[in-house]
Each structure stands twice: as C-alpha cells, then as structure tokens.
Amino acid sequence: MYAFIGVSAVIAFLVFLILSVVFIFKDKKRAKRFGMYAVASLFAIIMTMIADQSDRAKHEREQQEQKDEAAAAKGRVREALIEELRTNRVAIISEMKSLMANGDFLSAHNRAKKFVELNDSELQDLASEALSKHKVKRENELLSQLKKLPASNLEGNLELYRELAALSPNNQPYRKKSLQLQADVEAKKKRQQEEEQRRLALFGEPPKQSSWDGSYYPVESYLKRVMNDPDSLKMDSCTKVYQIDSGWLVGCDYRGRNGFGGMVRQSNWFTIRKDQVVRMQDASAYRP
C-alpha cells in the first residue's frame, strides 16, 4: 500500500518536472534529452522501490515463519508435558511428598516446576508449599550464618543479606541492610583505591619477580654493590612481595664468596622503594 503511494508520488513529480522543462526549454532537442534522462531515472527508482518492497515482504514472511515454528515447538513441548504428567502424576506427587518429609523442599518444588503451567491444582499447591517452606528454612540458615560472621566482613555480610532480601522482597529491614552494606563495600573499595594510589606515589610500582630465577632486580643490583665479590652472587629463591608501612618487602636466599674466598649462604629481608633497596634486615626480622 505504502509502496504504491510512494511510486505514484514519484511518477507524478517526474511528469510534472518533464512538462515544466518542456515548457521552459524552447530547444526541443534539449527538452527531449532531459525527458529521456527523467524517464530512465524514473524506471531506476521504481525498480529500486519494488526490490526493496520484495525484500521487506520476504523478511516479514521469514519472521512469521519463525514465530509459527516457535509456537508449534512450544505446543509440542506442552503436549509432551501433559502426557508425562498424565502418565507419572501419582509418582511425581509421591516423590514430592517424600522430599518434603525429608526437608528437601527446594528439590520438591523443582520436581513440579515444569508442570505448574498445566494448572493441576494439587501439584500447584504442593509446589507452593514446598517453595514457602524452603524460603523459611533457607532464611533461618542465613540468619545463623550471619550470627557467626564478623561485622567487619562487609562482603560476606552483603552476600548473605542480598540473598535474604531476594528470599523476602517485602522485608524492608533486609533490603535496607543490604543497601547499607552495598554502600559500605563501595566506600571500602574507594578507600583501598586511594590507599593504593598513595602507596604507588610514595613507593612506586611493586618490584617484579624474574620468571627465570625468581629474583628481584633491585635486590640483585643492591647486593652486587655491597658484596665482596659481586660476580660470585647466586640467587637461590625469593618470597612474594609484601606491603609494609615503609615500602615493598621481599625476602631472598642467596650465596656469594666472602673475604676468605669461601661460598656462604645468607637470607635477608629487603625493603624497596621506587626500584631501590632502602633497607636490608636479618631473616628473623619478619615472619611471612
């Protein structure tokens, strides 16, 4: 309908344009040539509009076919469910009652879940009862966990209160507590990010451990500066990086020649700031 109106409008406009040109141009050859161009343009426009309408109609047919197939598939699933319930109804209800008697309310509810839309009143009532009892049971479990969880564990408390709020959407205290904990967690993350930025500004990036021998370049460079025989240095192993108030802390085991030419093994802690060792301490100074 709309394509027909559009084509008619284009034709009317071009006819008007041709007649206007013929009237304006006294040179009939120029008017004729212009008219031929106009007719060719009109033909191209009409073909383009027809092709576009054809593509649109094809797309609409494909969409409708997909909808019809989806509806048919849904109908087949429903018929299969009806047959399954008709055949196994007694066994399903018996199984649900057994699960509920054993306190497994969620499994009982899930057993009937796919049949609820079939409007079997007994099955629906059992499923509703099972879900209600599951929520009460789970709520008591969560409240018990909260009593054992330190208030300082904001993330853990938030996770539990979120589940409580999901179990009881109309419970305002649960929802309010969940929102407050969410705000506290976000504030904690912000403080941690600010502290991390402050630490990076003071101490630089944490030193990176070599993938080859597990050593740290600042430690190796420092030892070679202070050792009796720098060329004899052998790095055996190093700890991960720790954060302390004065910088980045790593512990390393290493060997080197002493003043008498003998190889000795030593362990020390090294405080690093901006890729420079600023302090070396005995192995007994820290316990990781």
Image (spheres, grey):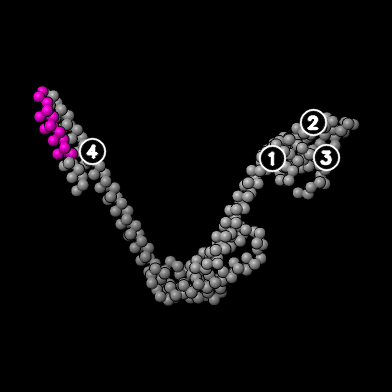
Q: Which residue is mark 2?
A: 225
| Residue 87 as seen in the image, left or right of residue 233 | left
Q: Which residue is mark 1?
A: 202
Q: CA distance from mark 2 to mark 1?
A: 24 Å
Q: Secondary structure at mark 3?
A: strand
Q: CA distance from mark 3 to mark 1?
A: 29 Å
Question: Closer to the observer: label 4 or label 1?
Answer: 1
Q: CA distance from mark 4 to mark 1?
A: 68 Å
- Mark 2 or mark 1: whose residue is earlier in sequence: 1
Amino acid carrying mark 2 in the image: Arg
The residue at 73%/39% (across/down) is 272
Q: Which residue is mark 3?
A: 266
Q: CA distance from mark 4 to mark 3?
A: 85 Å
Q: Which residue is mark 4?
A: 48
Q: Which residues are magenta?
A: 10-27
Question: Closer to the observer: label 3 or label 1?
Answer: 1
Amino acid carrying mark 3 in the image: Gln
- The answer to whether 72 is drawn above or below residue 57 in the figure is below
| Residue 223 as seen in the image, left or right of residue 106 | right
Amino acid carrying mark 1 in the image: Leu
- Mark 4 or mark 3: whose residue is earlier in sequence: 4
The residue at 60%/53% (across/down) is 187
Q: Quadrant of residue 3?
A: top left
Q: CA distance from mark 2 to mark 4?
A: 81 Å
